[in-house]
Image (cartoon, helix red, strand yellow):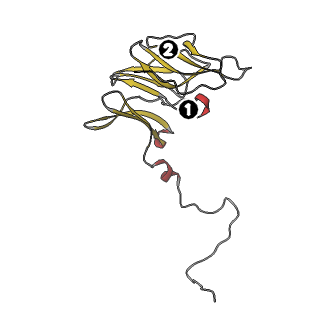
Amino acid sequence: MTASNPARTVQSLPYGAWPSPVTAEMLTESPPGVLEPGDNGQVPMWVESRPQEKGRYVLVTGTPDGPLDLTPEPFNVRNRVHEYGGGSWAADGDLVVFANFADNRLYQLDGIGNEPRPITPEGGYRFGDLQLDRVSDRIVCVREDHTDSALEPVNTIVALDLDGPNEEGGTILVSGGDFVSSPRLSR
């Protein structure tokens, strides 16, 4: 015996022609995603993905009055190291260093409301997995060198001077491997 439901109408449509209950507005009105949680030694910080801002990633901190954006538009806090990125920011107190997705450069931000300034050169390098070394006033991180487009990227761990300009892409600390990852500082 089969049950029938006269209120239900079956409709056949070609592939890709069915009406979706999911609208573009539903996708862009979603709450921001929270990524790369951490702190600056005093307050929590995290990266928010914002679909309503064309997918921009923003570094945010917690304050008594609620979340506060640290990175202004058009900065997009993420990187492409090893194609999947990660470790796009590091902070200690008011000092923040972050990777900007559009140009693959690292930027330093000194305090809330100040304009970020680049500390790495334009073109050819990607930086990720940032570790802030305040003892030596430097960033230790993974660097992908794409300056010779005929070769595969060269992966190294480098130290970058916080005062910039790091024209050579930093001082190489570890090299020779096809893949490098996760530099950490002893404290």
Residue located farthest toward the right when viewing the structure as drawn? 150
Rendered-image quadrant of the N terminus? bottom right
Q: Amino acid at mark 1?
A: Gly
- Is label 1 in a helix, a strand or a loop? loop
Q: Which mark is residue 147?
A: none
Residue designated by label 2: 160
Q: Is residue 90 left or right of residue 9?
A: left
- Can the viewer see residue 152? yes
Residue located farthest toward the front when viewing the structure as drawn? 186
42 w.r.t. 32: above or below: above
Residue 37, image x, y percentages: 41, 36
Residue designated by label 1: 85
170 w.r.t. 126: above or below: above
Circle count: 2
Residue located farthest toward the left when viewing the structure as drawn? 64
Q: Amino acid at mark 2?
A: Leu
Residue 154, image x, y percentages: 65, 20
- Can the viewer see residue 116? no
**3D distance between C-alphas at marks 1 and 2:** 18 Å
Rendered-image quadrant of the C terminus? top left
Q: How many C-alpha atoms fall within 10 Å of the one at disc 1: few (<14), some, or many (≥20)?
A: some
Residue occupying image coordinates x 43% and y 11%: 163
> Considering depth in this image, is 89 or 165 the residue closer to the camera?
89
Residue occupying image coordinates x 69% and y 17%: 148
Which picture quadrant has residue 7?
Answer: bottom right
Which picture quadrant has residue 134?
Answer: top left
- Is label 2 in a helix, a strand or a loop? strand
Residue 11, image x, y percentages: 65, 72
Residue occupying image coordinates x 46% and y 43%: 52
78 w.r.t. 136: above or below: below
